[in-house]
Image: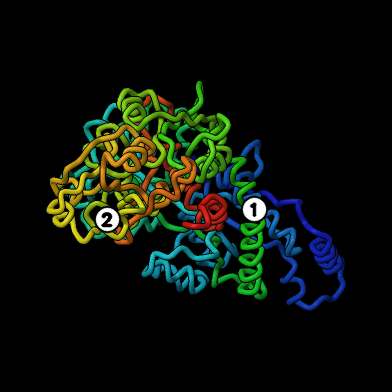
Amino acid sequence: MSISSRFVLNSISRRGVAALVGVLLGAAGWCLPVTAQEAVRPFRFTMEDYPPFEYEEDGKPTGIDVEVVTRIMDRLGIPFTIDFYPFPRAWMLLTKGKAEAATSISYNPSREPHLLFTAGQKAFWTTGEIPDDYLWMTEYVFFVRRRLKDSLEFRSYEQLEHDNYRIGINKEYTYHPAFWEHKLNTHEYIGPSEAFGALAEGQIELFPMDRTIGLWTLKRMGLESEITHLGRPLFRKPYLMVFSRASDYPDIAGVMKRFYAELAAMRESGEYDQIRSRYVSGASLHRADRPLRFVCEEWVPFEYLADGKPRGIDVEVTDRIMKRLGVPYEIQFYPWSRAWLMAEKGQAEAVLSVSYKASREKVLYYTPEQAAFAKTGELPPDYLWQADYVFFVKKKYADTYCFDSYEQVRTNGYRIGTNKDYSYDDAFRQADLSRIEYPDTKAGLTALVAEEIDMYPMVKTVGLATLKEMGLSQSVTWLPKPLFSKPYLVPFCRTSDYHCLEYIMYAYYRELASLRRSGEYEEIYKRHVLPEQ
């Protein structure tokens, strides 16, 4: 689908109106300086058809970026236009100075001669650090025909090259450095709609596209039932509002600086999130015939019941995220073994506070970064919280019992309590310790106080909060040397038939990252973590 429609927005402030009056006076014969006439011509934005960020509806521009541009330019008092074009033409207009700015473009060193970039935007290329002045984050995945989803796979770009899959690409798109390092069998298309059409007709096997835009475009094209996507992301990167070096608009660098300042203010005030949440919601892309079910065990202060209602850090975080996504949900509490059984049987959509374990992959979706932690030790960006395990002991034995190594624990013959179906870590599992199994944390701590066991390994935060809840804080303490640390996650269930569950999972992770960047997560965490921790 090619879009090339022109629309002059009416959202112009009093300063903008005054400027336009000046133009009219000049047209009537008044001798205004040329620079003044140039300064008041509309500022030209070009956009690609990228729903829900920028697209046309009933002949008018709409979408997240359109609303953001409208509010910012109105506040700056600058009249403007929006033109919709396929990206190759939009790029030509930018390079020739026929457009001042464009939305949803990423940084690439080859674009520097044509576009103005800030230091932070350029630094992402080498550091991977998200710049403060980004417009939105894109996450590319491979789209495939549904009937081929189980036979096609994406493990690496080397594998794609070896398997010689036909891959659709969009003209002038940069994608990602690793994408171009291999001789892939690529076929070029003018835009996403054309590439999706080719995918549906079997001309290509794979098409890389931003997940959100892809799903919206498929819905609009009526191809939802024919095309889906592979869950594993190819790459993530920030999309920017870029400004043309070739434009003769007066002080375009100053306009760019003021635009970014207003964008930062919108983010800080929450205005940007409010705009985004009205467009990018689970409700807009999936059919929710029942609440999405999270299952978990009680782990104070992260998730627990108080007066019969879910409470805790993860409960608050999940509530904010699911409300932003517009997806109805519920949280149900069970002993861990029962929660896991529900996940196995597809009776739950997601599990709160569970770690990665290779054997769980047949039941749970894990992102590559979550799975990689077991080998690299690198904290995945989509973790929920980080657990530090310690040995809890009775206070009266705190000076007697010690933990130097698992070999020393085994030699001393300490009896260790563990929770049923917990994964712990490899070293702990392989230590051949004398272990007694319990159904949950409260049962394990009760056994410790009763001296059925000598040591009980548990997350320090969870153990302390549970002891306080049980009234046992004066009886039990912990040994200072940590056993291990690992991230706890919110993996979603492969076994569930909930519509668009993978999409919702990645949307959940995106909003979780947003909560961390904004400081909201830290604020929630501090309110729940006990002072003595």
The residue type indicated by label 1 comes to: Gly
Across the whole image, how many numbered discs are drawn on residues? 2
**Viewer-proximal residue, 41 or 292?**
292
Instruction: Give the SS element for disc 1.
Output: loop
Whether residue 515 is visible here, answered yes or no, is no
Q: Residue at the spot x=45%, y=55% of the render?
A: 88
Name the N-terminal-most of marks 2 and 1. 1
Q: Compared to 383, does 174 lie above or below?
A: below
Q: Residues within 10 Å of mark 2 (few under 14, many from 20)?
A: many
Q: CA distance from mark 2 to mark 1?
A: 40 Å
Whether residue 471 is visible here, answered yes or no, is yes
Q: Position of residue 131 (x, y in %)?
A: 49, 65
Would you name the residue on which mark 1 appears? 270
- In the rendered structure, the answer to whether residue 88 lies left or right of residue 320 reads left
Would you name the residue on which mark 2 appears? 483
Instruction: Give the SS element for disc 2.
Output: loop
Q: Residue furthest front?
A: 396
The residue type indicated by label 2 comes to: Leu
